[in-house]
Amino acid sequence: MPGAKTGHNTGLTQTDLEELTTWRRDLHRRPELSGQEIETADTVQRMLRAFAPDTLLTGLGGHGVAAVFDSGQPGPAVLLRCELDGLPIHEVGDLPYRSEKDGHGHLCGHDGHMSWLAGMARVLSRQRPARGRVVLMFQPAEEDGAGAARVVADPAFAQLAPDYAFAIHNMPGMPLGHVALDSGPVTCASAGMRVTLTGRTAHASLPETGISPAPALARLMPALTALGHGQPKDHDFTLVTVTHARMGEPAFGVAPGEAELFVTLRTRTDDGMEALRQQAEAMVRDAADAGGLTVRIGYEDVFVTCNNDATATDIARRALDKLGTHVDDAALPLRGSEDFGRFGAGANLAFMLLGAGEGTATIHNPDYDFPDTLIAPGVRIFSAIVDEILG
């Protein structure tokens, strides 16, 4: 019934959970892409102001928002982080709260992650921690790898100075409510390598009078892919994925004079990424030289490895044990990337996965939706971690 307490250590009522579900679904209707989260940040600010944090910072690293709930007593600062951005993917399905923005969707669950921190705002507004302070960090631009780096580099971030940082990501394919947690690398480093090959166009009947990038492009796609080997648990794991290729113009009368190739590089470690970059670049330059082409190489969507600190991991594990949560490391490290690792430069950090159920659409699928049944467990975990450190 309304007003009844639900769950361990959250202080949330059934009414709270119903309101958080409605709030999450409203966010789902209006996703915004990385770096464009103006409306989302405004929605978050209005929500937070209703729970009277001791400090509210806005515009962090772009559109980031941070709320501080301070005990007034000496103690560590614990940062809890979620993400603001959606994806450039067209959502399919018949959800009553389906995205109203064609080609944009909250198809990674960041709307649900925001609901966890919105739940924590309710918990902390009713009872501050016994000591120290909690920072609720709503971070922009996670999907392109730029957001956390910009937030940490923002001069205003120095006011927050977290000693610990924690984040949870929902994970379809894992049993509902189970947690994946381990110390060391938990997500891979990755970099988007953009290659432009330039030669000279020619009439299609006289291809020998031009310089075509076709042979180099045909050579590079399988050769770069072949640089991948091993599995994420292997220290020297690498994965190279061709994600886009374009050559010339869509015309039958012109032999191409330019090509573009997008390749995503992944490694378990940051050192491994540097080595893989050097290998890939040498391969590209050799192919360009052999074809008489000029070449330009650039990088986008750069993520460092997310390394879980042993101390923060142990704290999270103790909190999860007290909740009776099933914990293992079978799903780790992920092949995917996550920019939360940037917060580890000045804080003890732990990133974990929370199972969203088996046999469900996975993240970045066009029919994915965050399960609302995960709202309460996510808040319980964050609340238990805060209790473990701050009391």
Image (spheres, rainbow, N blue to C red):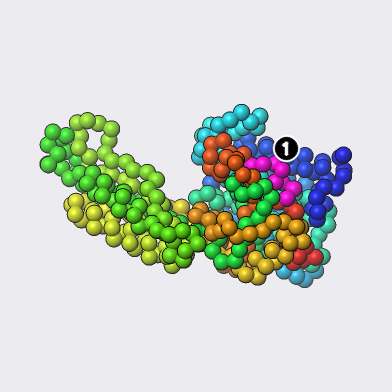
Q: How many marks?
A: 1
Magenta-drawn stretch contains 126? no
Residue at position x 83%, y 57% in the image: 127
**Where is residue 277 drawn, in percent x and y?**
37, 61
Residue 84 visible somewhere in the drawing: no
Magenta portion: prevailing SS class:
helix
Q: Quadrant of the N terminus?
A: top right
Q: What residue is shown with label 1?
A: 22
Give the residue type that dot 1 points to: Thr
Looking at the picture, tell me which residue is in the foreground, 143 or 222.
Answer: 222
**Horizontal arrangement in the rendering, residue 19 relative to residue 41 (left or right):** right
**Where is residue 115 drawn, in percent x and y?**
70, 46
**Where is residue 93 drawn, in percent x and y?**
58, 30
Q: Quadrant of the C terminus?
A: bottom right
Residue at position x 54%, y 59% in the image: 333
Q: Is residue 40 shown above or below 180?
A: above
Q: Which residues are magenta?
A: 370-377
Q: Quadrant of residue 332?
A: bottom right
Residue at position x 65%, y 39% in the image: 27
